[in-house]
Image (tube, rainbow, N blue to C red):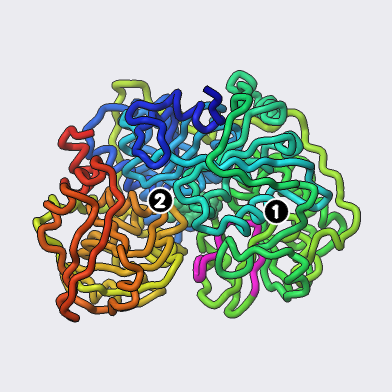
């Protein structure tokens, strides 16, 4: 049987179910990663499982998000993470060592293995041929304990690449083109596999940019074959031993096929406020920009910074533009310092930031009111930058640099012949920022500062649910809308009672108060509800506020499973017209919900306020139903269920 690469790896890791698109499967997880903003909860959950040590081949805990340390909270979390890692067999990547995805790609990625990460951009490592999936922290905790990761068996979309990119056209432009074609919900339920002659022409870091931002498609993950270019990268990292060539079997087929001729692409840009609002840079060229940011896990590799510096050689940023540059890892930072690229950037007037997520998640560098910020990042949801009325565009580092030079959005092809960047064959390797765990059996104190509050839990699901529909929302609500991040709110990730005050804060500041007054509540949404990040706080904090069920037109993958993991019922409309009829503040009831969940795939919702019944459906595996009945995945796992 000719398998595509995705199915080859899934088949090797399959522990439950059958590889039939749509059916639930369980896969063995080789590696996990967490970052600090999702990690504290993941490790509190891991601790609650009562195991001695992780059972994965490797688990790494990174610190890269909560790095501002404007109070004690972040530092407390870092100490907790380091101490818990040491005790349970987990490697700890210190603050300053880099953004989790960049560091993982450099130092730990392995072709053919599986990686589960509590961050939606975990697919970055798909660039080397891993099945690397983003999930909620609780799923990652279960995987660290040796449990399988359950997911609907994906359809595989084959993107057949031909040709080679023209000068000034980049991996970022490829994924922006894919987003233009497929949209932010086009990848739901799919793994995107790149194949064909054109693959050869893409460097490893270009591939990683493409798989990273595949998260914005809502895809389960994205993957490239492992080939000569992968080997070049592994050699540079002195990790040849981890390399093995991998590709789809000859004659393998895909559930859907897309053709992209790389030589036909040109520089692309995503307009505010969605990563799929993609147009050619040319179409918005001339728009005045006030800020330009190069960095984030999408585009902060050595090449990205070297090319940015090369564009600025002997030149200055435009007087009206603030340019920030973030090296993705300590490796990149040290190498741009040694090569002189950093000196060029400093001379050009760039603000060099520490190696962290920073402005990508609104941790500093919020743009001015009403201004335009052009970023090499992957998300531009409204308000995510920290300034609600800013206009964030997403483009390649090359387009960013051209824009910072001229002060207006600029197609980099207008700069003439591109500078040539030579990367060294061997990269700087220094893993001292990654602290190995204590030996098995050696225990030390786990440090819990006052910011770390116990994890709230939910009891088993009652016989009936009821709640006021506190919000009626439109399409594509992101987890940044549900549980915003940014400098004020992100440090509260370890304190659910405190962070819950900010649920839907920028949508409706009265939400948390109204939820508490109501005691139990529901939310109504449109298509692709919960797109974006893997943050389980977008389920956990609403659960704490009494959210019982969410009724939408459709859900994004990770958020839907986070809702289930925390005992919140995800429902979709049977008749689209019911969405229009429902009103905010309607009192809704689902009598006999336990019985309905165990029977079919529908529930009847009573609209008590308007006096009518409507049908809703649930697309859940029998395992997910059992999780919901148990009141969430933690209760389910503690009870020894699988
Ligand atoms: C993001 O890019 O939105 C984040 C912040 O990295 C999130 C994780 C989080 O909210 O902690 C993600 O992508 O999953
Ligand atoms: Fe960090 Fe931004 Fe990447 Fe999320 S998308 S991991 S916030 S750099």
Helix, strand or loop at mark 2: helix
Q: Which mark is residue 173?
A: 1
Residue at the disc numbered 2: 557
Lower sequence index among marks 1 and 2: 1
Q: Main secondary structure of the magenta part?
A: loop
Image side of residue 125 versus residue 114, left or right: right
Q: Residue 137 in the image: x percent, y percent?
A: 35, 45
* Residue at 46% over, 30% down: 10
* Residue at 28% over, 76% down: 582
User: Counting other residues with Cα less than 10 Å from the Cα at mark 1, is it few (<14), some (14-19), or many (20 or more)?
Assistant: many
Reply above or below: 558 against 437: below
Name of the residue lying farthest toward the right:
417
Residue 87 visible in the displayed image: no
User: Counting other residues with Cα less than 10 Å from the Cα at mark 2, is it few (<14), some (14-19), or many (20 or more)?
Assistant: many
Residue 544 in which image quadrant: bottom left
In what quadrant of the picture does the C terminus appear?
top left
Residue 277 visible in the displayed image: yes
Q: Nearer the viewer, residue 440 or 467?
A: 467
Magenta stretch bounds = 372-384
Q: Residue 304 in the image: x percent, y percent?
A: 71, 48
Helix, strand or loop at mark 1: helix
Q: Nearer the viewer, residue 21 or 402?
A: 21
Q: Which mark is residue 550?
A: none
* Residue at 62% over, 59% down: 180
Q: Residue 605 in the image: x percent, y percent?
A: 19, 66
Whether the residue carrying mark 2 lies under 8 Å from ligand 1 is answered with no
Q: CA distance from mark 1 to mark 2?
A: 25 Å
């Amino acid at each position: 049987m000719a398998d595509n690469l995705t199915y080859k790896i899934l088949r090797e890791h399959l522990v439950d179910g059958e590889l039939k698109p749509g059916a639930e499967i369980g896969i063995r997880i080789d590696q996990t990663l967490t970052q600090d903003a999702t990690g504290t909860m993941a490790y509190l959950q891991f601790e609650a499982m009562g195991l001695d040590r992780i059972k994965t081949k490797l688990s790494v805990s990174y610190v890269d998000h909560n790095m501002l340390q404007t109070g004690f909270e972040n530092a407390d979390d870092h100490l907790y993470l380091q101490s818990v890692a040491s005790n349970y067999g987990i490697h700890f990547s210190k603050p300053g060592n880099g953004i989790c995805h960049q560091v993982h790609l450099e130092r730990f990625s392995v072709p053919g293995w599986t990686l589960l990460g509590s961050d939606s951009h975990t697919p970055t490592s798909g660039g080397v041929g891993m099945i690397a999936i983003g999930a909620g922290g609780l799923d990652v905790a279960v995987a660290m304990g040796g449990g399988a990761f359950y997911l609907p068996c994906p359809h595989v979309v084959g993107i057949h690449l031909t040709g080679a990119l023209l000068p000034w056209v980049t991996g970022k432009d490829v994924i922006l083109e894919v987003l233009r074609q497929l949209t932010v919900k086009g990848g739901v339920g799919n793994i995107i596999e790149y194949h064909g002659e054109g693959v050869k022409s893409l460097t490893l870091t270009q591939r990683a940019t493409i798989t990273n931002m595949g998260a914005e498609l809502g895809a389960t993950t994205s993957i490239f074959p492992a080939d000569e270019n992968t080997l070049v990268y592994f050699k540079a990292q002195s990790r040849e031993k981890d390399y093995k060539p991998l590709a789809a079997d000859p004659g393998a087929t895909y559930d859907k096929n897309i053709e992209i001729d790389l030589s036909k692409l040109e520089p692309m840009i995503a307009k505010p406020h969605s990563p799929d609002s993609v147009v050619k840079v040319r179409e918005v060229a001339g728009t005045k920009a006030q800020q330009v940011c190069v960095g984030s896990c999408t585009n902060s590799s050595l090449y990205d910074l070297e090319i940015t510096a090369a564009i600025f050689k002997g030149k200055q940023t435009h007087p009206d533009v603030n340019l920030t540059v973030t090296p993705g890892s300590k490796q990149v930072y040290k190498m741009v310092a040694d090569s002189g690229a950093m000196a060029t950037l400093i001379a050009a007037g760039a603000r060099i930031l520490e190696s962290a997520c920073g402005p990508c998640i609104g941790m500093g560098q919020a743009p001015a009111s009403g201004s335009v910020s052009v970023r090499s990042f992957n998300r531009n949801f409204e308000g995510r930058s920290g300034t609600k009325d800013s206009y964030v565009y997403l483009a390649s580092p090359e387009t960013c640099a051209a824009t910072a030079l001229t002060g207006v959005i600029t197609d980099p092809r207008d700069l003439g012949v591109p500078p040539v960047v030579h990367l060294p064959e061997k990269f700087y390797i220094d893993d001292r920022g990654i602290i190995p765990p204590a030996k098995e059996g050696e225990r030390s104190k786990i440090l819990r500062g006052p910011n770390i509050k116990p994890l709230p839990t939910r009891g088993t699901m009652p016989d009936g649910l009821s709640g006021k529909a506190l919000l009626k929302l439109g399409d594509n609500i992101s987890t940044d809308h549900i549980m915003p991040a940014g400098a004020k709110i992100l440090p509260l990730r370890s304190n659910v009672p405190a962070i819950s005050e900010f649920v839907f804060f920028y949508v409706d500041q009265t939400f948390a108060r109204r939820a508490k007054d109501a005691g139990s509540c529901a939310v109504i949404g449109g298509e692709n509800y919960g797109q974006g990040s893997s943050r389980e706080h977008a389920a956990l904090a609403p659960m704490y506020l009494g959210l019982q069920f969410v009724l939408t037109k459709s859900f994004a993958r990770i958020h839907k499973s986070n809702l289930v993991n925390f005992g919140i019922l995800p429902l979709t409309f049977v008749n689209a017209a019911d969405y229009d009829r429902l009103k905010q503040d309607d009192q809704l009831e689902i009598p006999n919900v336990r019985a309905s969940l165990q029977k079919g795939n529908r529930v009847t919702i009573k609209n008590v306020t308007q006096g009518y019944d409507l049908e809703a459906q649930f697309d859940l595996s029998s395992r997910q139903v059992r999780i919901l009945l148990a009141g969430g995945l933690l209760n389910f796992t503690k009870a020894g269920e699988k």
